[in-house]
Amino acid sequence: MRLHRLEITAFGPFGATQTVDFDALSSAGLFLLHGPTGAGKTSVLDAVCFALYGSVPGVRQTPGASLRSDHAPVGTYTEVLLELTVGDRRLEITRRPAQQRPKRRGTGFTTEKAQTWLREYDPATGAWNGLSRSHQEIGEEITQLLGMSREQFCQVVLLPQGDFARFLRADAEARGKLLGRLFDTRRFAAVEERLADLRRVAEQRVREGDERLLALAHRMAQAAGGLDAARTPVEGGPGEPGLAAAVLTWAAVARTEAREALDVAGLRLAAAERRRDGARAALDAERDLAARQARHADALRRRERIAERAPERDRLRAALDRGVRADRVAPALALRRDAERERDAARAALARSRARLPTDLADAGAEQLAALENRLRGELGGLEPARRAEHRAAAVAEERAVLAREARADEEALRDAADWLAGWEPRRARLAGHAEAARDAVARAEHLAGRLEPARRRLAAARRRDALARGAEAAEARLTEARERRNDAHETWLDVKSRRLEGIAAELAAGLEADAPCQVCGSTDHPAPARTTAGHVDRATEEAAYAAYTAAEETRTAAERELAVTRESWAAARAEARPAPDGDPAA
C-alpha cells in the first residue's frame, strides 16, 4: 500500500481543509511527522485509518466521541479524502461521518447520515470511475485489498500515541504486557494454555497407560507363576521415564521363558498324545474283540432257537409246496368251469329252439332239420321274382299318379297364361307409363339431392345467425352494464384518491415520532402536526377502490372482446345463410 494524497476537512483539530501530499514527502523513501503536543500528528494517522475503515483507533472510537472539529464553521462538512495505490489499482476513498447540520427550514439541527464514496483511476482515459457508495461493499473491498482488518491494521501499522516511548522505557514484564496489548497476544496465550492442557491430558493418558501396562505385566507374571501377588515385576511407578522399556525388557525375558516352558510342555504333550494313541488302539482292539464275541454268542443263541422251531418250519414248507402245486392247476380248473357254463347255456338255447319248432319237428334230428332248411330256402328263391314284379307295379302306379297331377298343373298353368296374355297389352302400356314416371322422378330426385346439402348448411347457418344475434344483444347489454360499472368504479376511485390526498398530511403526521426527522421536510420539530378528520380515507380504502376499478375495467374489456367475437361469428353465419345468386327458392 502507498499513500499519495490526504485531504482533511473539519476533522479532529483541523477546522479548515488541510492537504498532505505524501508523494512529495516520501520522495526520499522516508518521512517524519513531528510537532508539539496537540498539533494533530495522531489525527493525521487517525484520518488515514478512518478513510480506510470508517473508524479510528484508540479512545476516539469510544461511544459518544465525535470526530468533528470544534473549530470548524457551521455548514462545513467533516470529510476525509484519501488517495492511495494498492497493488496495481489507484483508488480514492471519501468518507463523511454522521454529523449535525443546520435545518434547511426553520431553526435547529438535524443529523446527516454517514456517507462513503469509492473511485478508481483509469490510466487509459485519465478519469476517475465511481465504484460504490455502500459502506459494507467498500469495507469488504478495502479489507480484501489490504489483507488486514481495522484491528490488525492498528496493531501492525499504527502504534497509538505514547505507547512506543512507554515500550522503550518499560522493563521486561511491562514490555511483554505492552506488546501483548499492542499485538493482541491473547491468542498465543490461549494457544500456550491449550498446549499445557494437552500436555496435562497426555501425561494423564501416559500415566493411565503405564498403570494398564503394569497391571498387564502383573497378570502375566501371576499367570507364569513366577511372581508373588504382593510384588510388581519391574521397578518404578506409573509416569516414570523408562517404565515402558523396563516392562518390555521384562516381557521379552518372560516371553523367552514362556517359550521354553511351552516347548517343554509341547514335548510332554506329544509324549502324552503318543501314549493316548497307544491306549486308544488297545481299547479299539478290545472293543472289536468284545463285539465279535457278542456276535458269536448271538449266533449260537439263534442257532438254538432255529433248531427248536425245525418241526414248525417243515410243516410250513409242506403247506407251501401244496399251495405251489394248487396254483399251477388253478387255470385249468377255471377253464373247466367256463366250459361247463357254456355247455349249460347251449343246452338251454337248444331247448328254447326246439320249443319254437312245430310238434312234428320237435323230436327231429339235426339232419332232418338241415334238409328242411334247404327245402325252405329253395321255395323262398322261387318267390323272389314275383315279389320284385309286385314292387315294380306299385312303383308304376305311383308314377302314373304323379304324372296325372303334373298334367293337371300344366293345364291350369296354360289357362293362367292365356288369361295373362289376354290382358298383357293394357298392362304393358300402364307399366310403361309407370316406368317413365319413375325415370322422371329419379331425375328430379337427383337434381334435388344436389341442392339439398347446401340448403341444409344454409339452414344451420341461419339458425346460428339468429342465435348469435340474440347473443350479440345480450353481449351489448352486458357491455353497457360493464361500462357503467367501470365508470362508477373509476369515479369512486378518483373521489377516494382525492379525499386521501386532501388528508395525506394527517396520514404523514400519524407516523411522526419525537426527535425523528419528517419524511417531507426532514425537520425533527413537529410544532403543529395535521389531524385526521371524520371523512379521512386511508391507503387501504384507496387500494380497495382502485382494485374494484381495475376489476371493473377488466370486466369491461372482456365484455368488449366477447361482443366483438359474437359479431364476427354473426357476420360469418349471415354470409353463409344468404341465398344463391340465381334466386332459386330451393337454394
Image (tube, grey):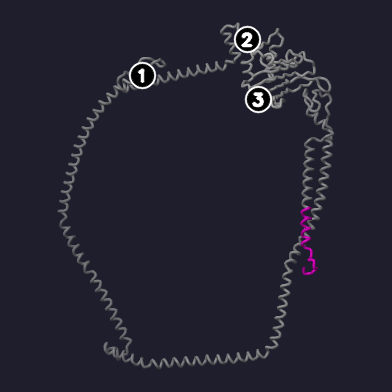
Q: Which disc, if any, is residue 141?
A: 3
Q: Is residue 235 above or below residue 485?
A: above
User: Is residue 471 rendered to the left or right of residue 89?
Assistant: right
Circle nearer the N terminus (1, 2): 2
Residue 436 place in picture, x, y as percent: 71, 80
Residue 453 place in picture, x, y as percent: 72, 67
The quadrant where residue 26 appears: top right
For label 3, the SS is helix
Contact flag, marks 3 and 1 (Cβ < 8 Å): no
Circle nearer the N terminus (2, 3): 3
Looking at the rendered image, the disc whose residue lies closer to the viewer, 1 or 2, is: 2
Q: Is residue 406 above or below residue 257?
A: below
Give amino acid for label 1: Val
For label 2, the SS is helix
Give amino acid for label 2: Phe
Circle nearer the N terminus (3, 1): 3
Residue depicted at 61% across the width and 22% down the height: 147
Contact flag, marks 2 and 3 (Cβ < 8 Å): no
Residue depicted at 72% across the width and 19% down the height: 81
Q: Which quarter of the figure is the C terminus placed in?
A: bottom right
Q: CA distance from mark 1 to mark 2?
A: 58 Å
- Which residue position holds label 2? 164
**Which span of residues is magenta-colored?**
563-587
Q: CA distance from mark 2 to mark 3?
A: 31 Å
Q: Which disc, if any, is residue 492?
A: none
Contact flag, marks 1 and 2 (Cβ < 8 Å): no
Residue 314 place in picture, x, y as percent: 16, 59
Q: Which quarter of the figure is the N terminus placed in?
A: top right
Q: Which disc, if any, is residue 247?
A: 1
Residue 558 place in picture, x, y as percent: 77, 49
The quadrant where residue 155 appears: top right
